[in-house]
């Protein structure tokens, strides 16, 4: 995906562009952040000698030593809870939840402490910590390896929730998340870990709390994030062949929501649909549809659509293709609008 | 005795009978029951006595104020003074405390102002004191969650070669929580300078200890994590102070965490909204009232001739002065600014929050909350 990378302001590019995966870009971001600031520490399950099950921390323990990056006991609440204490002390912990469905034991720490610390202490205690969560499906994972848990975090006041869709954003947004004085839930779409883009590091893309128009169009706004940005771009490409001009917005940030960028696009196109892998009912798309409608109703020619996963537990690997939104399903949904009005 | 010696034999079970330095009659205990710990010096015991008397007066005062409707709730620590004070008195000002909602008197002992401690129980704001200034975390309401914060903070300090210790309180009920297990295990695996003080006050609101555990003592659990555990008479402040001091020193010198169980009793209800007559007999409460931690130390200090009438009068005066100050500050309604609700959610401004703030401001300006607390301004 090059749209974001080409819109990047000239950063202090130090190397000629090379093909880099999202996992590689995240690895570079961690390495550069750890080099720049010795308060940055990394721990979680298998992040040490193994380099993480997705190899995002590959080679970092050998480079920085066990006092900077280490394998913790296998307990997600323990990982998040101890990170709270470390952040209180002044560290900048970057911790990993191995898979999103494995993060649930940490829910209480996240909701009751991570999200609320700044508020309950009137800003006297802040938690500069990043919780990296590999998320979503389409990797052929067995049960409990493909959830989309973003709406749990996004609906929790006090958390900042972002999800890059491409290697350039992965690098830039992770650096920004680590530099943030507030806790950031950094969601990494597993199916995009191996996507490549030509990249010269370090790269600075748009601020992580902003959405970006990654393809311009005039007839429809497709809103995606993480893995569904590619779905939206595929749909836009296919639709272009039939004369339908689709604009694609990559949300990048789920909390906060960039009403400005999304609203401007919707007011231009007058039609909007949001795409995500998570179940539709009570999913993040419900918030998107509601906000877009509330703020832009008189500019809309049709109801805001949600193209989402079914309201079912995530399927087994051989059935996940039926569940996940596809470009065809997106285009079929757009066909349900009345287009003559 | 040196806890460093103990560290080599952490598979040793804690004593079945609670370790004790002063018996209920105020006599110094000798022999095996002391676990080898020596009685703190008289000057220290006098200071602990003073702190307990002042803390109890504060606790009684706040319970009274709560009954008068001045506070939304107050979880009393009446009867647990030896655990609370004995443990925190073993800390230096550089060490950190991670308390629970029950531990207001420990906060008082750390030097936090009554008005600041009680902000949350009055309902003004969730946490009212400067955590960094007092090295005391917010009082945790979710059970055992703060124990992990203590482990994380003390581990970070250790990584920085900063010789501080974090002490956290847990209740007997909290030991059933997953976070207690994770905190014990992380602390032991990482060898963090953390001291866990379990105040076994016999009840988790209404549920008695036998419904929480089949373990013979809560201190026994330490063995499974590979750390030392101490089963201590929690109404004997001499023992609580001596054992905690040794644990703090061991943690500070790199010896890792310790689990201390103080066996005590919650004399008051869980909070003012609780009715303990539904789940425990009055005679049990009376039994424990006869094991009062303050009277025990007082008997000892008087028998030693260390506590004079003049000193008692002076301590009572100090306690009364604090109670009066507490009454005074609780009588003054805090000025609350509803618009501050939006000020501390994120460090970076959010457009949607600014919109909501403006909407509330307009509502207030239009008189929607006229006469309500805080909204008149």
Image (tube, grey):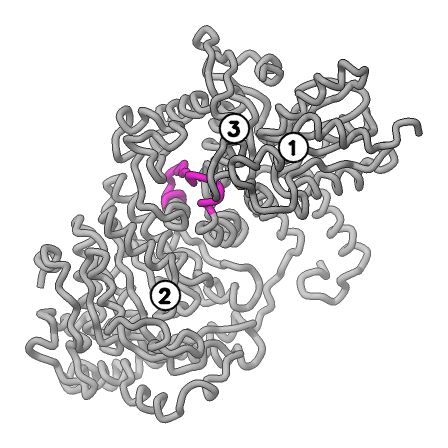
User: Dot 1: within a 10 Å radius of its alpha carbon, few (fewer than 14), some, or many (20 or more) residues?
Assistant: many
Residue depicted at x 17% and y 83%: B23
Q: Quadrant of the C terminus of chain A?
A: top right
Between B17 and A21, the one lying in front of the other is A21
Q: Is residue A264 left or right of residue A173?
A: right
**Residue A196 rendering spot, x and y as whole percentages:** 50, 17
Residue depicted at x 24% and y 67%: B219
Provide the residue span drawn in magenta.
A85-103
**Residue B133 rendering spot, x and y as whole percentages:** 39, 52
Q: Secondary structure at mark 2?
A: helix
Residue depicted at x 56% and y 81%: B68
Say which chain tag 3 marks.
A
Mark 2 on the same chain as mark 3: no
Residue identifier under label 2: B176
Q: Which mark is residue A325?
A: 1
Say which chain tag 1 marks.
A
Say which chain tag 2 marks.
B
- Magenta stretch encompasses residue A92: yes
Q: Marks 2 and 1: in contact by CB < 8 Å?
A: no
Between A319 and A74, the one lying in front of the other is A319
- Magenta stretch encompasses residue A208: no
């Amino acid at each position: 995906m090059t749209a974001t990378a080409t819109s990047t302001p000239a950063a202090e590019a130090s190397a000629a562009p090379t093909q880099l995966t999202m996992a590689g870009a995240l690895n570079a971001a961690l390495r550069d952040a750890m080099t720049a600031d010795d308060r940055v520490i990394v721990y979680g399950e298998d992040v040490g000698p193994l380099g993480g099950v997705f190899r995002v921390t590959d080679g970092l323990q050998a480079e920085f030593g066990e006092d900077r990056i280490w394998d913790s006991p296998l307990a997600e609440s323990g990982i998040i809870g101890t990170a709270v204490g470390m952040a209180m002390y002044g560290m900048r912990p970057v911790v990993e939840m191995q898979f999103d469905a494995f993060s649930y034991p940490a829910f209480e720490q996240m909701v009751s402490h991570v999200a609320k610390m700044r508020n309950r202490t009137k800003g006297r205690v802040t938690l500069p910590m990043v919780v990296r969560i590999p998320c979503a499906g389409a990797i052929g994972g067995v049960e409990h390896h493909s959830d989309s848990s973003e709406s749990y975090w996004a609906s929790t006041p006090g958390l900042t929730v972002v999800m890059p869709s491409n290697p350039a954003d992965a690098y830039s947004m992770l650096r920004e998340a680590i530099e943030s004085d507030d806790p950031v839930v950094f969601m990494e779409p597993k199916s995009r870990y191996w996507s490549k883009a030509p990249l010269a590091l370090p790269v600075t893309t748009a601020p992580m709390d902003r959405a970006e128009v990654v393809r311009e169009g005039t007839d429809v706004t497709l809103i995606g994030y993480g893995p569904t940005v590619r779905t939206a771009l595929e749909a836009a490409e296919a639709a272009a062949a039939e004369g339908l001009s689709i604009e694609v917005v990559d949300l990048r940030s789920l909390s906060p929501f960039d009403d400005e960028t999304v609203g401007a696009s919707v007011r231009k196109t007058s039609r909007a649909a949001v795409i995500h892998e998570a179940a539709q009912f009570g999913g993040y798309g419900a918030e998107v549809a509601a906000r877009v409608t509330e703020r832009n109703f008189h500019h809309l020619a049709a109801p805001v659509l949600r193209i989402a996963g079914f309201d079912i537990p995530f399927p087994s690997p051989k059935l996940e293709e039926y569940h996940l939104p596809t470009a065809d399903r997106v285009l079929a949904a757009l066909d349900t609008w009345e287009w003559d009005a | 005795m040196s806890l460093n010696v103990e560290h080599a034999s952490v598979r040793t079970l804690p004593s079945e009978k609670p370790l004790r330095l002063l018996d209920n009659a105020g006599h110094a205990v000798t022999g095996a029951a002391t676990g080898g710990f020596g009685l703190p010096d008289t000057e220290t015991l006098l200071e602990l006595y003073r702190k307990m008397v002042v803390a109890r007066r504060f606790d009684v005062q706040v319970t009274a104020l709560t009954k008068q409707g001045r506070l939304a709730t107050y979880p009393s620590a009446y009867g647990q003074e030896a655990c609370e004070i004995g443990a925190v008195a073993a800390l230096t000002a550089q060490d950190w405390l991670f308390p629970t909602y029950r531990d207001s008197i420990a906060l008082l002992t750390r030097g936090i102002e009554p008005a600041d401690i009680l902000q949350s129980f009055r309902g003004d704001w969730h946490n009212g004191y400067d955590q960094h200034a007092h090295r005391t975390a917010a009082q945790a309401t979710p059970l055992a969650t703060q124990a992990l914060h203590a482990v994380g903070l003390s581990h970070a300090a250790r990584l920085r070669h900063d010789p501080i210790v974090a002490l956290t309180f847990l209740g007997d009920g909290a030991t059933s929580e997953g976070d207690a297990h994770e905190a014990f295990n992380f602390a032991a695996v990482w060898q963090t300078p953390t001291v866990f003080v379990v105040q076994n006050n016999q009840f988790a609101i209404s549920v008695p200890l036998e419904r929480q555990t089949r373990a013979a003592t809560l201190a026994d659990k330490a063995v499974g994590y590979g750390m030392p555990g101490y089963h201590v008479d929690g109404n004997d402040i001499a023992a609580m102070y001596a054992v905690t001091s040794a644990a703090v020193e061991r943690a500070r010198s790199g010896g890792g965490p310790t689990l201390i169980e103080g066996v005590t009793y919650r004399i008051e209800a869980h909070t003012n909204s609780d009715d303990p007559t539904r789940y425990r007999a009055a005679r049990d409460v009376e039994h424990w009232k006869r094991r009062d931690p303050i009277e025990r130390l007082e008997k000892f200090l008087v028998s030693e001739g260390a506590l004079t009438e003049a000193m008692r009068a002076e301590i009572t005066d100090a306690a009364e002065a604090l109670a009066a100050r507490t009454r005074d500050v609780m009588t003054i309604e805090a000025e609350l600014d509803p618009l501050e609700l939006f000020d501390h959610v994120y460090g970076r401004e959010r457009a949607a929050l600014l919109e909501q703030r403006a909407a509330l401001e307009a509502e207030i300006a239009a008189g929607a909350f006229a006469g309500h607390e805080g909204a008149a301004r």
